[in-house]
Amino acid sequence: MIRATPEDRPAIEAFLKKHIATSMFPLSNLRQHGMSGGHPRAMQFWVRWEAGEIADLLPVSEQGGVFPQCPTAPWGAVKTVLTGTTVKGMLGDARQIAELRAVLGLSGQGGLDQEEPLYELALGDLKMPDCTGFNMRPLAAAPRTLIIGWRRAYLEEVLPMPGEDSEQKAKDDIESYIAANSHRVLYRGDTPVAMTGFNAVLPEAVQIGGVYTPPAARSRGLARTAVAMHLQEARSRGVAHAILFAASPQACKAYEAIGFARTGDFTILFYEEPQVIYG
């Protein structure tokens, strides 16, 4: 594999779009932060070319996130590229991540290590639930203490990171979501009842993340209503595709009810202590 240059960017974007369901993070990072460095999510890419086309791609963020998009499994070449690199985490197709971890010798090193069902939906096929009495509002309009508490509970339940200060992380997340206008709160009348958001946004696709309903209000269809209404908003802007990972069987049922179909599995892996790759 060889290091990509800025001149390769159109081919890189085209390749990632071909595999968009497992490429939203690196593609979003590329479009927001580029390839020249200076931001934790700025991207570097290593490419394996075949007959003038990209066959395999290794995206790595400046902060040490690895997002393999390697259909032909050239793991020896990937290990050579990563030798000496400090890896903070890996996200992507579950099969690829499992194979790469084994080659790198990192199979049991995760601080957060989850494999979740991957779902996709063409927004023209979105099935809207009955939204009578509900409305969506920007995160900035919701009570700050309430939504920070919801985010903290979400982190502790769904994304527990050993040693992390979940209260501070929740505050930081909410501030960034408000700045990006990426999340919404579902209201029944004037009462906030659930939260939803997008953790990656492109003109052509969105990736859902951070859906939360308080435990006492679950099993009432609130999550599917929140997600569907947010996707309806995105569709009105011209977004054509939605992607998500489901954290539980209950979540799978909720998303399937509004039209999502399972298309694979996605691994979310973050190390408690960054790992240095040795040859």
Image (tube, helix red, strand yellow):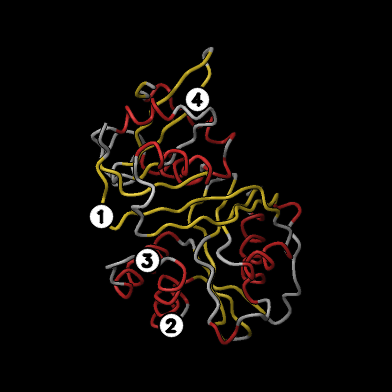
Q: Earlier in the sequence, mark 1 or mark 3?
A: 3
Residue at which label 4 appears: 11
Q: Earlier in the sequence, mark 4 or mark 2?
A: 4
Q: Earlier in the sequence, mark 3 or mark 4?
A: 4
In this rendering, the answer to whether 6 lies above or below 187 is above
Q: Position of residue 225 (x, y in %)?
A: 67, 72
User: What amino acid type is highlighted by mark number 1?
Assistant: Glu
User: What amino acid type is highlighted by mark number 4?
Assistant: Ala
| Mark 1 closeness class: few <14, some 14–19, many ≥20 residues within 10 Å | some
Tag of residue 273: 1
Disc 2 is placed on an element classified as helix
Q: Of discs 1 and 2, which sits in the foreground? A: 1
Q: Earlier in the sequence, mark 4 or mark 1?
A: 4
From the viewer's perspective, tell me whether residue 205 is left or right of residue 261: left
Say which quadrant the N terminus sits in.
top left
Residue at which label 3 appears: 173
Viewer-nearest residue: 72 or 14: 72
User: What amino acid type is highlighted by mark number 2?
Assistant: Leu
Q: Dots 3 and 4: beta carbons under 8 Å?
A: no
Disc 3 is placed on an element classified as helix
Q: Of discs 4 and 1, which sits in the foreground? A: 1
Viewer-nearest residue: 100 or 52: 100
Residue under the image location 43 percent in, 23 percent down: 8
Tag of residue 134: none
Distance from disc 1 to disc 3, alpha carbons, whole Å, reads 21 Å
In this rendering, the answer to whether 35 lies above or below 240 is above
Distance from disc 4 to disc 2, alpha carbons, whole Å, reads 44 Å
Q: Dots 4 and 1: beta carbons under 8 Å?
A: no
Q: Position of residue 134 (x, y in %)?
A: 66, 79
Q: Earlier in the sequence, mark 3 or mark 2?
A: 2
| Mark 2 closeness class: few <14, some 14–19, many ≥20 residues within 10 Å | few
